[in-house]
Amino acid sequence: MKLALIDRCPLCQSTDIDLFKKGTVIPEKISAEDFKITDSHYGSRWTFFFCRDCGFVFANPAPAQGAIEQFYMALADEEYSQENEGRGRNFSTILKRLRPFAPPGSLLLDVGAASGIFLDLARQAGYRVSGIEPSKALVADAEKLYGLKLFCGTVEQYTVSEKFAAITLLDVLEHVADPGSLIATLNKFLAPGGMLVIVTPDIGSLTARIMGGRWWHYRVAHIHFFNHGSLSRLLEKNGFEIVMCKRFAWNFSLYYILTRLLPCCKGPALQKPLKKLHCKLQFFDSWELYARKKES
Ligand SMILES: [Zn+2]
């Protein structure tokens, strides 16, 4: 895998950067498997640097943009769709919170739509939906599971004539090579006053600090992290104002949680009973942020 050494903060260009945490990944051993959404190798991380000026935390050296995109194009994740119910519960809360800012009936774009769980719910709630997803396998799943036709590719390749009332980036920002250019591009897709919803891990959270290198958001696919300061700065720089900031709660079946902790428990015997039991996990370590595009 091609890696690039970084000498300044990718977000604010400051050269005042320093080591944040030493990594555990071996770049030569990384494969598309490590980029699965359900990857259970928690604690495996890049060497991270942080920016003294804006607080951004980023992999350094970082995997090259082209390399990451290729992994996502090749990604197939059979386990992801198996947790549809829990993920659906998380996403319903987002739709409820979005409603006063972008009512049902308006146009909504989900970036990194995976197998379309969120878009299916948004459509049921009355939104006119579009989605972008680089993985061919996940695009095929979305069509098979929900009859959704997602755009297979990247945001840079996407073209659209209408402007959106809302764009959602749910657990996507920490995966992309250049979050600054992503937010700038998405701004162009939004109508004035349009909403951007971001869910992303919070490196400044108490949970992240207590867990240190064992924090569950450390995984190969997460190549940088935000805290409240760096996220606000990124949004303000790109013409957004934050209107609401919440803590995202995860909803998982007991089967999912158990098999993350003890992979040896995977199998049909426990799958049926434990999939019916759901629990909400709130670690206060992910942002669920609502930002409005400023009228210019
Ligand atoms: Zn910075």
Image (cartoon, grey):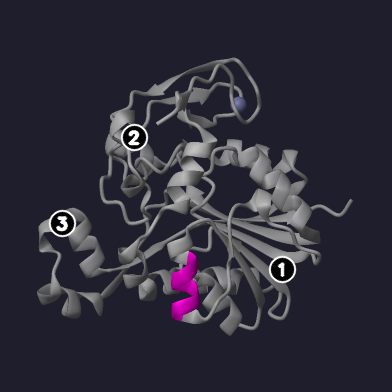
The residue that disc 2 covers is 45
Is residue 13 on the magenta stretch? no
Q: Nearer the viewer, residue 225 or 4?
A: 4
Residue at 47% in and 52% down:
73
Query: Which of the two labelled residues, at mark 3 and mark 2, occupies the earlier sequence position?
Result: 2
Expressed as whole percent of the image width and height from the top left, the position of residue 290 reads 64, 57
Ligand 1 quadrant in view:
top right
Ligand 1 closer than 8 Å to label 2 CB: no
Q: Which residues are magenta?
A: 139-145
Distance in Å between CA atoms under marks 1 and 2: 37 Å
Classify mark 1: residues with Cα within 10 Å, few (<14), some (14-19) or many (20+): some
User: Which element is circle 2 on?
Assistant: loop
Query: Which amino acid lies under the numbered mark 1 shown in the image of this protein?
Result: Phe
Query: Which amino acid lies under the numbered mark 2 shown in the image of this protein?
Result: Arg
The residue that disc 1 covers is 101
Give the total number of marks visible in the rendering: 3
Q: Is residue 287 above or below residue 64?
A: below
Can you tell which of label 1 and label 3 is closer to the viewer?
A: 3
Observer able to see residue 25: no
